[in-house]
Image (cartoon, rainbow, N blue to C red):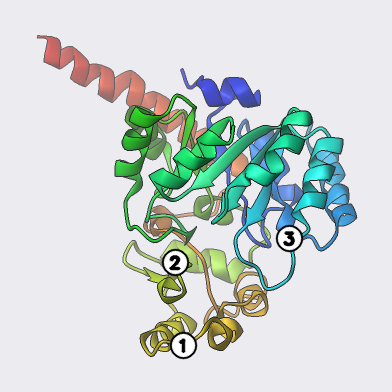
Amino acid sequence: MLKTKVTEMLGIEYPIICGGMNMLSNAELAAAVSNAGGFGLLMSANFETAEQFRNEIRKTRRLTDKPFGCNINMFPSVRPIPNKEFVKVICEEGIKAVETSGHRSPEEYMPRLKEGKVIVIHKAATIRHALKAQGVGVDMLAIVGMENGGAVGMEDVSTLILVPILAEKVKLPIIAGGGFADGRGLVAALALGAEGIVMGTRFVATQECIAHRKFKEWMVKATERDTVLIMRSISNTHRAIKSKAIDEILKLEARGASLEEMLPLIGGAAYKKVMMEGELEAGVNMAGEIVGLIKDIPTVKELINRMVSEAEAIINKRLRSIAGTSRK
């Protein structure tokens, strides 16, 4: 019932992908998602060297015999990210698919990835960036709306609008991101024309994710009104959970502060304090609006099984019942 172009191309059971997340997308989380029938991703930018990244790939293989992928981060970074070396490792290690994300086109990496027979999924926040990626030969397109946690682009368009518009313009399989947490969202994405979904925030609130317990509990308590957009003033809009640090960032932006002035609050050290050490007010705390739908901290397997059961029940019962009624 949930077989799509995404499940066929990636060789997975369910069209559910765990997106690449800073500091969090490690072997344990990627393997848990893949073992549960989805598609897990390692975040290459979490590693300083190609060999560290290679070791994490091999560690993931020890934890799962199912397909998994890697993310190539093309967002601006304080430290240089050796993406060319990471791409080389991905090809040498025979990785099934790669998610490219960021402000730039993946064009410079396409020849090597194609040579390595790697499926390329480019994640964009606008239709024009998705179309540009199609033009350089990617295999799938992920489109994320303003509900998304983390990077959301600058155009403030929701996933509900972006997915059907993109579906009308491209023939490539589309993966919907931003606003997904359960089986209802999965069915909605498929109805809009997507072949699967990519989730980040919901997978943070699972037992296998290494985010601090305090942060996960904070997410469970948060409502759909507890996130806000930041860093718009430096053309790098992200969605985060409200906190004292976020309030300070917004004040800095209001007076036209530079990136350098904001770095103590948006940089990696502050993010680590929040995510890994549980100092919830210390820095940026990326999360999507779907925190309002998070009510527990299950295992990854429990989460995916629940989503699939919900989706199948909606398709089998509610939608068929409505369709049957309409024919009478």
Q: Position of residue 33 (x, y in %)?
A: 64, 40
Q: Check disc 1: other Cα within 10 Å, few if <14, some if 14-19, many if 20+.
A: some
Q: Amino acid at mark 1?
A: Ala
From the image, tell me which residue sits under label 3. 46
Tell me the element at label 1.
loop
Task: Single out the mark in the foreground, 3 or 2.
Answer: 2
Residue 257 tag number: 1
| Residue 87 percent across, percent down from the top left | 77, 45
Q: Earlier in the sequence, mark 3 or mark 2?
A: 3
Q: Is residue 33 visible?
A: no
Q: Earlier in the sequence, mark 2 or mark 1?
A: 2
Residue 308, x across and y down, in percent: 48, 30
Q: Residue at x 38, y 70 (%)?
A: 228
Query: Residue extending furthest left?
Result: 328
Pick the residue in front: 71 or 314. Answer: 71
Q: Which mark is residue 237?
A: 2
Work out whether 27 lies above or below 63.
below
Question: Disc 3 vs disc 2: Cβ atoms closer than 8 Å?
Answer: no
Residue 288's tag is: none
